[in-house]
Image (spheres, rainbow, N blue to C red):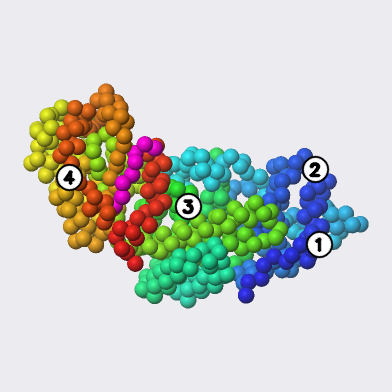
Amino acid sequence: MVHGTPPPGHDPDQDRIVQALLRPETYPHRPAHITHLQTHISHVFLTGGLVYKVKKPIRYDFLDFSTLAQRSYFCRQEVKLNRRLTHNLYLGVARITEQKKRLAVNGRGRVLEYAVLMREMPQDRMMNRLLAAGQVGGKEIKDLVRILAPFYRKAQTGGAVNQDGRVAVIRKNTEENFIETRPFVGKLVSPATYQTVLRYTRRFIDQNRSLFEQRIADNRIRDGHGDLHSGNICLEPEIQIYDCLEFNHRFRYSDVACDLAFLAMDLDFHGYPVLSRLLVREYVRLTQDLEAKRLMDFYKCYRACVRAKIHSFASTESEIPPKERRDHRRQARRYFQLAQTYARADRPVLLIVFFGLMGTGKTTLAQALSRKTGWKVISTDRVRKQLARLKPTVRQPEPFGQGIYSRDLSEKTYRAMRQEAEHLLKQGHPVILDGSYKQQEERRALLELARNLGADICFVECRAPVTLIRQRLEARRRDPRAVSDGRWGLYRAQRADFDPTGDIILQHGFRIRMDQPPENLARKILSQITEIRTKFNKLP
């Protein structure tokens, strides 16, 4: 049974403390402004330079702050453990005292409560805010890995730490998520999503017992951070990674892959899968921990469930304002959906084909989706000129169907694209193909490729108004960097030579009107990818 926050008034001392900490005279430095925030387990007071964090007198199955002695102990633990990855941030533990009915921070008299005392960090340098503003790139990710890799290498291992890396404990942690989120099924998570994630998690544990045991033998179980996401990272001139899980070592003693997976999942959640993959790739490069990649989707799924659970709990707390509770409900739903994405990651690899007439914008859309996902784009324009031993931007204003656009060289181009796609798909990488694919036989060859490899395939036919196509082709003609030789004089000839697309669209794809910004269209395609694959490929 989960025991949550007592209702307001249940703990009179805590109610008085919260009210007192909203008044400047309670503090030694008499702050001019006080901001009160709260999580499901803490009250946080920002006082202009200093932060006081008070633990709520609550008890869950995984946490016990129900007594003053417990809260005192975990305040000290929080300071001690968080100093491992921070610098001059955690200042100590403050006492909230009472004398003659007056409450004070570090005053005289009876101790009513304890608070973690921290230096306030610049909010505009918090990683989650910078992600939302698009201001986090590869440099920041690599800087983080250069901090985390030696941290994990030096972190405590063996003995009690290794005990929490056992399969039994991993199963306990994952099953705890399912038990505690069961009341939210049908409210914040659909029964189908819940069952998909549950079945995947149990199956992965059952099928990878030897891998988990080998991780213990390889000393990959460490006393890590436990709550490594962008909301707990400040990229001020010196990176601060703070707010680790001090209250339950079972969540902190874990596989380093599990610890790192939290941040990788968080980057996915914020819409940065390329940075997520860079984080893992850079970590593996520095540590040679090759097996971490095998575990990443499993642990990202687990971490998404943890976040979904936390937001689900917060969505029911009466102390939190209604608007914030609604936001917690939205966040919980998003995390449940993300967990389902990882649970389905072992589905067949995906081949997306952007095709259509010249000037419809298929190349621009393919590149936009590639920037969003990191998936490789293979384009007819580039492959054709590579085969002809021409630089990509060299113009070849050939008559329609002649020169490098002859049937013979076109067949070689599409064959070379299929071979490159096959190589990437066999390695497990999704692929984006970009070309006109005007002949039915070219499309059928891709269907056969996907069928032979057991890959999912989705054709996206790009269409646009003729006036817009003409504008694009004229702009392309004047652009010295353009790779495509498509021009308005060839448009009608290509349209007349374009085989019908009805069957391929009906069975394996859809059409999209290319009169919106490509980034918007890429987001729409990406957000619906699961539904697309289910609909057109009949996957279970």
User: As displayed, is residue 501 above or below residue 254?
Assistant: above
Residue picked out by circle 3: 269
Q: Is residue 124 magenta?
A: no
- Mark 2, secondary structure of its residue: loop
Residue 139: name its quadrant: top left
Residue behind mark 2: 30
Give the mark nearer the N terminus: 2 vs 1.
1
Check residue 387 in the rendering and tell me which mark sits there, or answer none. Answer: none
Tell me the CA gap for discs 1 and 3: 39 Å
Give the tally of numbered discs.
Answer: 4
Q: Report which residue position mark 1 lands on.
A: 13
Q: Earlier in the sequence, mark 2 or mark 3?
A: 2
Position of the N terminus by quadrant = bottom right
Q: Amino acid at mark 3?
A: Phe
Q: Nearer the viewer, mark 2 or mark 1?
A: 1
Please report contact status of discs 2 and 1: CB closer than 8 Å, yes or no.
Answer: no
- How much space separates mark 2 and mark 3, taking CA atoms? 39 Å
- The reply to whether residue 187 is visible in this rendering is yes
For discs 1 and 3, the disc positioned in front in the rendered view: 3
- Give amino acid for label 4: Asp
372 on left or right of 360:
right
The stretch of residues the image draws in magenta is: 509-516
